[in-house]
């Protein structure tokens, strides 16, 4: 038996040398090989995304960073379940979400969604703004922030769409040096929604089983498993808005 193994070694070595290992684009999950099949929604053409790099492993959905063209950064979100594509596209059309450039879907693999990466120095979550600004920093902007929120809620209801998870950590606010950028025309405060996993057509999407029911100052409009209906987003916002702006600033917390 041992002599047979030694006789087979040369042919095995030759086979190994001829069978080059598959080439994987650096930073890309190995099940995909590359991000070459992403479809540009606007032009219906494929786009090559190179040098993808992991950005987050702590979230429920992994994120990767890349560029469509030099100087045009994008985020790539890997989603194993549902994603509110129509919600994302509709809100982006009205400036209430980042641009969704494309997606890649293949049976048996998580879907990939490619969208505009908002600059981190000028877009932060409403949750982070509240903590950083504190009560005194929030108060001058509360009225305009709520008007901007109402404009988004009005648009959702007009389009028959729901987000389902409109908490402050899923709302981005446009800032400069830590303060909201105020426009002379309404809505004066720039807001954009993120995380559209639960969203879609009202009555056709449901609250997921992994929803956290233990969050303080949040009142979910319906139980887990129930349909997300028109008006639910506004009810959720109303439940936490009454407390918004009451956080002490980071300076006070650390003092």
Image: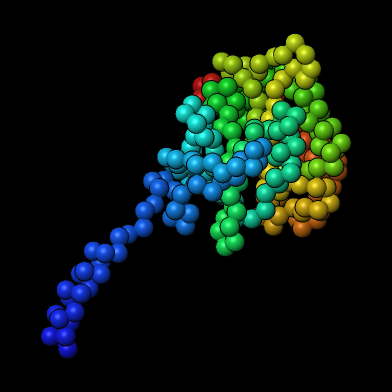
The picture places residue 142, in percent across and down from the top left corner, at: 74, 21
**145 relative to 77, above or below:** above
Q: Which of 77 and 165 lies nearest the eye of the viewer?
A: 77
- Does residue 21 appear anywhere in the picture? yes
Question: Residue placed at 60% from the left, 42% from the top?
Answer: 45
x, y percent for residue 19: 30, 64
Judging depth in this view, the residue of 85 and 37 nearest the camera is 37
- Residue at the farthest bottom position: 1
Q: Residue at (75%, 17%) from the top-left corner? A: 188
Q: Pick the quarter of the image with the N terminus.
A: bottom left
| Snapshot quadrant of residue 110 | bottom right
Could you tell me if residue 131 is visible in this image? no
Q: Quadrant of residue 181?
A: top right
Residues 136 and 38: in front is 38
The residue shown at (79%, 43%) is 162
Q: Position of residue 99 (x, y in %)?
A: 64, 33
Q: Residue at x 64, y 32 (%)?
A: 98
Q: Is residue 85 left or right of residue 57?
A: right
């Amino acid at each position: 038996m041992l002599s047979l193994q030694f006789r087979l070694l040369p042919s095995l070595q030759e086979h190994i040398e001829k069978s080059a290992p598959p080439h994987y684009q650096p930073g890309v999950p190995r099940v995909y090989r590359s991000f070459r099949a992403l479809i540009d929604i606007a032009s219906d053409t494929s786009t090559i995304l190179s040098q993808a790099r992991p950005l987050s492993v702590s979230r429920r959905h992994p994120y990767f960073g890349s560029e469509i063209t030099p100087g045009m950064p994008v985020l790539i979100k890997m989603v194993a379940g549902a994603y509110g594509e129509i919600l994302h596209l509709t809100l982006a059309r009205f400036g209430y979400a980042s641009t969704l450039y494309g997606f890649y879907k293949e049976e048996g693999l998580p879907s990939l969604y490619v969208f505009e990466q908002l600059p981190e120095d000028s877009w932060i979550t409403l949750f982070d703004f509240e903590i950083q600004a504190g009560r005194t920093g929030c108060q001058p902007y509360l009225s305009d922030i709520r008007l901007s929120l109402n404009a988004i809620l009005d648009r959702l209801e007009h389009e028959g769409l729901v987000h389902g998870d409109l908490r402050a950590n899923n709302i981005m606010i446009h800032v400069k040096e830590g303060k909201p950028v105020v426009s002379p025309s309404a809505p004066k405060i720039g807001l954009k929604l993120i995380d559209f996993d639960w969203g879609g057509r009202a009555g056709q999407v449901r609250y997921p089983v992994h929803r956290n029911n233990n969050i303080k100052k949040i009142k979910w409009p319906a139980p887990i498993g129930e349909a997300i209906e028109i008006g639910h987003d506004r009810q959720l916002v109303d439940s936490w808005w009454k407390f918004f702006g009451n956080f002490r600033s980071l300076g006070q917390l650390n003092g």
